[in-house]
Amino acid sequence: MTARVTLVVAPRERFSYTRPSLESIFSHTLIPFELVYVDAGSPPPIKTYLKDQSDQRGFQLLRTEHFLAPNQARNLGLKYVNTEYVLFIDNDVQVSAGWLEHLLACADETGSTVVCPLTCIGQPLHQRVHLAGGEARIILESKGKKVRRRVHEKHYFVNRTVADIQDQLKRQQCEFAEFHCMLVRRSIFEAIESLDEALLSTREHIDFCLQVTNQGGKIYCEPAAVVTYVPGITLDWADLTYFSLRWSDAWEVASLEHFQKKWKLHKDKYFQKRFRRLGHRRHQALLRPLSCRVSFGKRNPWLESLLIPLERSINRILTRYYQSPQL
């Protein structure tokens, strides 16, 4: 049986979950598939592990010695895809039994261009919803003689437990998916060509899905397919530096400004909120645990506020040093 889909694995924000994620894919995927794994600057132990797995299992391994933004990595992998479908999946995702079969069945039966699974977050696996489809569209808002373009975005069932909403989960058309795990009909790239690499760290999924919709493509969520995004970085230097670059102030600002200009959007609360929250992922993942550690296990907002300016300065230095020479 010939493979109809190629999985392109790209780094999301860390490398330390590479092994459980890859083993999950091979354990729970029973139908034929091709695999292109993009290793963008992982540390030596992960590099060696991936090389060994590639040799044993026969998948395509693409290695760069520098970090890549996620869309850079996905586009690199996309060049090696020849199947009817491409499935983008991050390197920190665990899949479940039947996941790929359900996604392909949905695409075949609905004629959709993009299909996302029920995407959960954290551990225990497959229990708390991160994304079950959602809405994303450009709205025209008239004020007097002025017409403003605004982006509308809504996530379905975010942070709800799967058990609480099980009876509400059904295959349905929606307006966006996320790159944690996204099945795409490859023919769409004849019109869109590639993913936008100017979106370094945010809004890349919204941008792509808006383009798909503009081309007349349909987007579906198939909750029979279940995967889980597992966040959490280690103190490994490669994890710390890639996470800091991935969610750097510079990359977030550049991404938001590009997205706003590309779609001719008004800088309303949607953007203002995201500019105010610059660095919040780093602060939650790095500063808060550090302040708790030196405060005998208790959260210390005062210490966090003192550390933020220092962390921002360090982040600017790391960004200049570690970002790809292509950027």
Image (cartoon, rainbow, N blue to C red):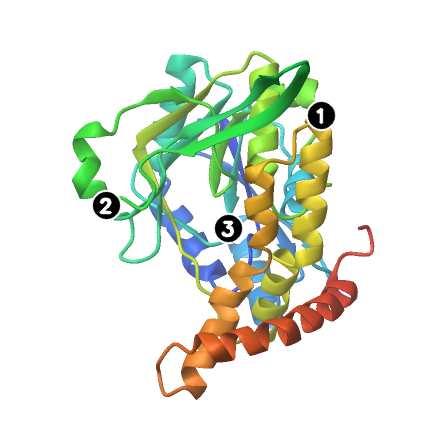
Disc number lying in front (1 or 3): 1
Can see residue 279? yes
Foreground pick, 13 / 55: 13
Which circle's residue, 3 or 2, is located before the other in the chain? Answer: 3
Q: Residue 207: percent from the left, percent from the top?
A: 61, 31
Using the rendered view, name the quadrant where residue 268 is placed: top right
C-alpha gap between disc 1 and disc 3: 30 Å
Residue drawn at x 42%, y 84% as measured from the top left: 293
Residue count near mark 1 (Cα–Cα under 10 Å), binned few <14, some 14–19, many ≥20: few
Q: How many marks?
A: 3
Specify which label sits upstream in the sequence, 1 or 3. 3
Res 193 label: 1
- Of helix, strand and loop, which one carries label 2? loop
Q: Would residue 234 be found to the left or right of residue 80 on screen? A: left
Asked if residue 1 is positioned above or below residue 322 in the image, the reply reads above
For this view, does 260 lie left or right of residue 269?
A: right
Q: Amino acid at mark 3?
A: Arg
Tell which residue pokes out farthest to the front in this image: 144
* Residue for badge 2: 161
- Measure how far apart labels 3 and 2 are at the Cα level: 36 Å
Q: Where is residue 58 shown, x and y percent of the image?
A: 55, 48
> In the rendered image, which residue does mark 3 sit on?
57
Q: Position of residue 145 (x, y in %)?
A: 68, 13
Q: Given contact means CB atoms under 8 Å apart, are the residues at marks 1 and 3 in contact?
A: no
**What secondary structure is found at the residue carrying circle 1?**
loop
| Amino acid marked by disc 2 | Thr
Which residue is found at the position 78% from the left and 64% from the top?
Answer: 320
Q: Position of residue 238 (x, y in %)?
A: 61, 69
Please, what is the three-letter code of the amino acid marked with disc 1?
Answer: Glu
